[in-house]
């Protein structure tokens, strides 16, 4: 009987892998996108500032910020203290090896898929510790097919999430084995695996939520063993944080990334809304951009409804199990919540939820099994409103989640393919690396990434100036080398707050401010709540000697400056 159960489990896992491959296949067929081109330039040696194989996630430092602005990699409105530096040496090395072995994105995606497989196997090994065979494969399916994996599998530069989960799931298993009376070897294995997870990226800090939760809700062995178990995670995490600080890694001056230590006010003021969106996405298996637009009362009502809708069936399912299973369930739920706290430093996205899903998936599986496959020896679950909530929970994670994964992978494929086609048009128009390009208006993808996609080796054009990210603008010719750009009332030249990668809201631009970059001086003529409304751009040469383009709705297009004294609209 045991052999037959094991065979079914292996078969179920293989079926999950096949379904996952089919769902995520569009993303696995995607070309390079955004940071992938920057990484390629770093490996090829064409990035303006040299990078080592362990340093590909080091995008902007104090030492090379001025150079990156000079070359146009960073826009004119860049925060004067902007730094974007991630401590991900292992993930960096893996990407470096990818580019050294082959320039075929398909092979790089296959590499990412292997890490996803390892992460799923690691999650399954955790679930088998506590769940029945049926609940184990339900939890494994929920975790494996969740929408949170679509972007890390589709976007090669985001692979660090998969690597962190692959090491992290096995590290958790070894640490809990040691904590519950296992051999010293289990503790050593946990320490090594957690160390590799930390080298993969800062996402691994979220694993600490489970270590804390199991220490609170799990078994209570001797204090010394509990402390050593926590140390298998805590020591590598502390070493990583110390190394980050000593080597100057971290983020500052960006609205997209909000460091709790250097941007405390912005971090804590926006944390509740970001956490709410992450919780909605995790439990409803969705990608809820609409949460960001809700008012405070609507958001509060939503969170109350979601919380009650989840708590009632999950609590009822846990109460039907023995004390040990209830304790594990509470630990997994608490761990999944705690794991989200480090993620509120980043603009919310389902790609941040992989580690949280390690605990959410088994909680949902226990609930579904209790309601849909009741133990004959126990009283049958009541047929009431809680049963409807369980149906909704099953729908979100077994139907809506996988479908969202497929749609997300398809959307990523279409977006990245469109990026390639746009870069091809621009490459033909720019012609050579000696060109001086003015991007009158652009989408956010253009600023840092498009110039690296113009040449196969990532070489930049001689000059690359991005003037605005606003959808609509009016260009007015003021002189042979001078134009004004005017944006609609209530709009700014670039997004503000968490949507602006290059400038946080703590240092807004006002009327009268002047910013000079090589070959260009920008003077803010009119300000506003959403940022500059009118800016004068003075170039060091005649406007006709430059290549003028704008990123439109369907493709790039040329936008030659109007004659002196005239104006022209620039629309998508």
Image: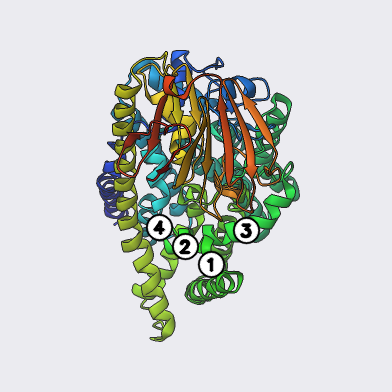
Task: Report how far apart the C-alphas of labels 4 and 2 lie in the structure.
Answer: 28 Å
> In the drawing, does residue 170 fall left or right of residue 568?
right
Check disc 2 and report the residue beneath it. 290
Residue at image mark 4 = 139
Residue nearest the viewer, comparing 193 with 502: 502
Mark 1 or mark 3, earlier in chain: 3
Gap between marks 1 and 3 measured at Cα: 37 Å
Which badge, 4 or 2, comes first in the chain's sequence?
A: 4
> How far from the left and from the top, in percent, is residue 116?
39, 40
Mark 3 neighbour class, 10 Å CA radius: few under 14, some 14 to 19, many 20 or more:
many
Task: Quarter of the image for the N terminus: give it.
Answer: bottom left
Q: Residues within 10 Å of mark 4 (few under 14, many from 20)?
A: many
* Residue position for label 1: 294
Instruction: Report the number of numbered marks.
Output: 4
Disc 4 from disc 1: Cα separation: 31 Å
Which of the numbered marks, if any, corresponds to residue 218? 3
Answer with left or right where residue 532 lies relative to residue 372. right
Residue 429 percent coordinates (x, y): 32, 24
Q: Secondary structure at mark 2?
A: helix
Can you tell which quarter of the image residue 118 is in?
top left
Q: Secondary structure at mark 4?
A: helix
Dot 1 and dot 2 residues touching (CB under 8 Å): yes
């Amino acid at each position: 009987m045991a052999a037959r159960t094991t065979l079914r489990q292996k078969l179920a896992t293989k079926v999950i892998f096949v379904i996952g491959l089919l769902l995520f296949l569009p993303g696995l067929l995607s070309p390079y996108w955004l940071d992938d081109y920057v990484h390629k330039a770093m490996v090829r040696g064409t990035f303006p500032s040299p990078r080592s194989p362990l340093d590909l996630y080091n995008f902007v430092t104090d030492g090379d910020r001025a150079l990156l602005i000079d070359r146009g990699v960073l826009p004119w409105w860049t925060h004067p203290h902007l730094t974007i530096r991630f401590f991900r040496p292992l993930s960096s090395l893996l990407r470096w090896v990818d580019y050294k072995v082959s320039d075929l994105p398909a092979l790089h995606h296959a590499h990412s898929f292997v890490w996803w497989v390892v992460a799923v196997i690691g999650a399954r090994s955790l679930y088998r510790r506590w769940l029945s065979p049926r609940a184990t494969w339900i939890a494994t399916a929920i975790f494996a097919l969740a929408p949170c994996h679509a972007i890390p599998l589709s976007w090669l530069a985001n692979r660090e999430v998969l690597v962190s989960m692959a090491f992290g799931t096995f590290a958790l298993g070894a640490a809990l084995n040691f904590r519950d009376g296992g051999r010293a070897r289990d503790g050593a294995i946990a320490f090594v695996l957690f160390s590799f997870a930390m080298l993969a990226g800062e996402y691994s800090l979220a694993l600490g939520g489970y270590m804390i939760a199991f220490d609170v809700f799990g078994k209570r062995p001797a204090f010394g063993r509990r402390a050593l178990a926590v140390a298998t995670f805590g020591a590598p995490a502390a070493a990583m944080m110390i190394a980050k600080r000593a080597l100057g890694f971290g983020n500052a001056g960006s609205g997209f990334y909000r460091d709790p230590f250097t941007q405390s006010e912005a971090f804590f003021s926006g944390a509740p809304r970001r956490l709410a969106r992450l919780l909605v996405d995790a439990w409803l298996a969705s990608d809820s951009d609409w949460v960001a637009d809700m008012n405070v009362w609507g958001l509060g009502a939503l969170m109350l409804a979601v919380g009650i809708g989840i708590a009632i069936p999950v609590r009822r399912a846990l109460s039907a199990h023995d004390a040990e299973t209830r304790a594990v369930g509470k630990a997994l739920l608490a761990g999944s919540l705690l794991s989200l706290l480090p993620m509120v430093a980043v603009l919310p996205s389902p790609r941040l939820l992989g580690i949280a899903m390690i605990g959410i998936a088994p909680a949902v599986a226990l609930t579904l099994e209790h309601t849909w496959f009741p133990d004959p020896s126990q009283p049958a679950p009541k047929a009431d409103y809680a049963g409807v909530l369980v149906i909704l929970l099953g729908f979100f994670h077994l139907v809506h989640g996988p479908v969202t994964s497929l749609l997300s992978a398809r959307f990523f494929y279409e977006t990245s393919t469109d990026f390639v086609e746009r870069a091809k048009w621009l490459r033909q128009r720019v012609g050579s690396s000696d060109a001086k390009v003015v991007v009158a208006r652009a989408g956010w993808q253009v600023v840092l990434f498009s110039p690296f996609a113009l040449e196969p080796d990532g070489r930049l054009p001689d000059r690359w100036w991005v003037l605005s990210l606003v959808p609509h603008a009016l260009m007015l010719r003021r002189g042979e080398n001078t134009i004004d750009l005017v944006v609609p009332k209530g709009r700014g030249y670039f997004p503000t707050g968490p949507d602006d990668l290059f400038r946080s809201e703590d240092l807004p631009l006002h009327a009268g401010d002047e910013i000079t970059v090589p070959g260009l001086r920008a003077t803010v003529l009119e300000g506003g709540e959403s940022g500059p409304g009118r800016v004068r751009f003075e170039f060091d040469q005649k406007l006709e000697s430059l290549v003028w383009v704008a990123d439109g709705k369907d493709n790039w297009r040329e936008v030659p400056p109007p004659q002196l004294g005239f104006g022209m609209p620039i629309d998508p």
